Image (cartoon, grey):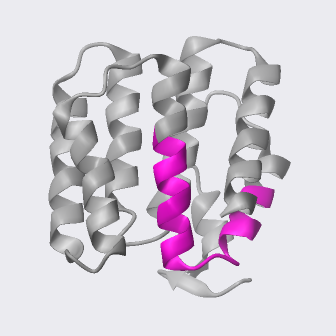
Amino acid sequence: MGKIIKDGFTFMEYANSRLIKATDDIPALKNELITIGETKTHIQMSEYALGLGKHILSVTNFERIKEIDECFTVIKKWQNKEAGFQIARDAAGVMNDLARSEKDPLKAKVYRAFGQIAATPHVRWHALAASDYAVVIINLMFPKDIDKVKAEREFQISLLNSV
């Protein structure tokens, strides 16, 4: 823990720099998730990203469009050494383009989460950024319901521990 990862920051410092702003969160649970993430391999983080993506679709009842399917596909291809980082970056870019053009804030955040999920083969910490988007999604679906946020973070911790 504490490895410098970007611009002189440890991942814990970088992840808590509020680059993704959840309206309500539980910092202790977020930090626990980050700490667990620091013990996981890149492949394990990509497994977590796949599980988180399925969870987001389940929680939101969001339609699994072809662009979302591609996010799952690029991770699996990368895990099987059938693809490099560029297809992950490309899939993430498609999701971010969808998010920019989306008027519905919930759909936009789902697209942002999947952009992070797709980018996980490129940099494993994108999986944790997707976790923050999942909390933002919960905040949008259940405003001011800290119990729902707590349940989301606890689910994420359990999922990450299971990979």
Q: Residue furthest front?
A: 80
In the picture, the quarter occupied by the N terminus is bottom right
**For residue 107: magenta?**
no
Asked whether residue 122 is in view, the answer is no
Is the residue 81 above or below the residue 25 in the image? below
Q: Residue at x 33, y 50 (%)?
A: 72
**From the viewer's perspective, is 93 left or right of 131?**
left
**Quadrant of the rendered image containing residue 25:** top right
Asked whether residue 81 is in view, the answer is yes
In the picture, the quarter occupied by the C terminus is bottom right
Q: What is the magenta range?
A: 32-53
**From the viewer's perspective, is 18 left or right of 43?**
right
Is the residue 31 above or below the residue 40 in the image? above
Q: Residue at x 18, y 34 (%)?
A: 66
Classified by dominant secondary structure, the portion drawn in magenta counts as: helix
The image shows residue 17 at horizontal and vertical percentages of: 59, 57
- The residue closer to the viewer here, 26 or 113, is 113
The image shows residue 89 at horizontal and vertical percentages of: 21, 62
Q: Residue at x 16, y 71 (%)?
A: 86
The image shows residue 74 at horizontal and vertical percentages of: 25, 60
**Quadrant of the rendered image containing residue 148:** top right
Q: Residue at x 50, y 32 (%)?
A: 56
The image shows residue 39 at horizontal and vertical percentages of: 70, 78
